[in-house]
Amino acid sequence: MWRPGPAQCYSGQQDGGLKGANIVDALDTLYIMEMYEDFDEATAWVEKNLDFSLNTEVSVFEVNIRFVGGLLSAYYLSGKDVFRRKAVELGERLLPAFKTPTGIPWALLNLKSGIGRNWPWASGGSSILAEYGTLHLEFMHLSKLSGNPEFAQKVMNIRKVLERLDKPHGLYPNYLNPNSGQWGQHHVSVGGLGDSFYEYLLKAWIMSDKTDEEAKKMYYDALQAIETNLIRKSSGGLTYIAEWKGGLLEHKMGHLTCFAGGMIALGADGAPGDQTGHQMELAAEIARTCHESYARTTLKLGPEAFRFDGGVEAIATRQNEKYFILRPEVIETFMYMWRFTHDPKYRDWGWEAVQALEQHCRVEAGYSGIRDVYAASPNHDDVQQSFYQAETLKYLYLLFSEDDHLPSDHWVFNTEAHPLPVIRRDGTDQPHKDKTAA
Ligand code: DMJ
């Protein structure tokens, strides 16, 4: 019987008082792994207990990627209407977040009062690129499933605002003020604060059956600017994506940034000019670097961030960057690289991660994060993040599945690994037939 993990399932800070992140995030994984009894049990919980009418403040981004995304995928996979209804209801509750002078949404929203605000730590009261830029896929599906065009209009407006702005060196800073429509600090990252914005440009194009030319252009232009300004090679020959702070590079790459190998591989085929081969090579180099970040630790699991300065390469040097919280990004990249190249090393690398997870993260009631991947033995943090079941386990499963299991010409994964179908020009996309008992 599936149970949600160790003592603490998930640090609920992002979801306020909203309950059930582990259950909703895991729904589609259970379905994909054909664990239908557990899926039915989780469905019953959603029917009876999933409640959005709460006086609680949530992160619009986290609730969108985990709850809206999880519900949408559960609907498309199982055809059960309860998931469609709940996704639309939650989407409607998120709409007040867009009530700002520019339409760039607030980061935080009280689900009952509809009052929004931004993170107090964000530069000059800004909204965050990776947060307001990671709503597009889910909101396009919400419009399709509800018949309400408002969801799509909100995310298309975000595009318009971004398109009109001047971009330093073609780059998108992580901070944008929703009142003035001006950039905050010029900090650019393909990891935390920026990451999934780029992912959603590419996937918006793919999910539109390749009709969304605006998203396509924005993605490939952004990737070009990233390559010119942020991507570097270490003296030991490892390609990495640095962070850009007002024109200066910090030679650090986050575990989060490792998703970029998979993203670049996914986009390589549609790359303009004769860039396809080059982008596949770049994706492979990033995959190798991220694998090295695992291989160079004692526990063979990667640190939260690793550096390329002070005489080290792909190693964390600061104590507060040595932890591993069951993140998926490196395995996600291995999965895409395997599917596009069939080079067996990607399955080998994925298997190394499986063994390390079993050896060092498995605990009595589930899996736990680790405080220091360079320590001789694991010191558990006693938290199983909900993305472990949503993403890490799903991408591992797909890495060892046949290519026709959720193929990338029919499905795009939201940033929490929830598969959403390509919206066909001819309207032939339909939810799957229900395979479960309930
Ligand atoms: C997930 O919630 C998503 O992948 C998000 O885009 C980034 N962080 C976590 C996993 O590390």
Image (tube, rainbow, N blue to C red):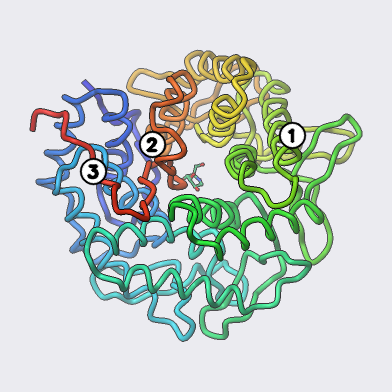
In the foreground, 369 or 84:
84
Q: Residue at x 75, y 45 (%)?
A: 274
Q: Kindly identify which numbered label has been placed on residue 256.
A: none
Name the secondary structure under disc 3. Answer: loop
Which label's residue is closer to the chain start, 2 or 1? Answer: 1
Residue placed under numbered mark 2 in the picture: 390
Residue 206 x, y percent position in the rendering: 49, 50
- Mark 1 vs 3, N-terminal side: 1
| CA gap, disc 2 and disc 1 | 28 Å
Q: Which amino acid does label 3 sit on?
A: Pro
Question: What is the x, y in percent for residue 264?
Answer: 64, 43
Q: Badge 2, how many Cα within 10 Å: few under 14, some, many 20+? A: many
Give the class, few, some or many, for how many residues have Cα within 10 Å of label 1's Cα (few <14, many ≥20). Answer: some
Q: Which mark is residue 431?
A: 3
Which residue type carries mark 2?
A: Ala
- Closer to the observer: label 2 or label 1? 1
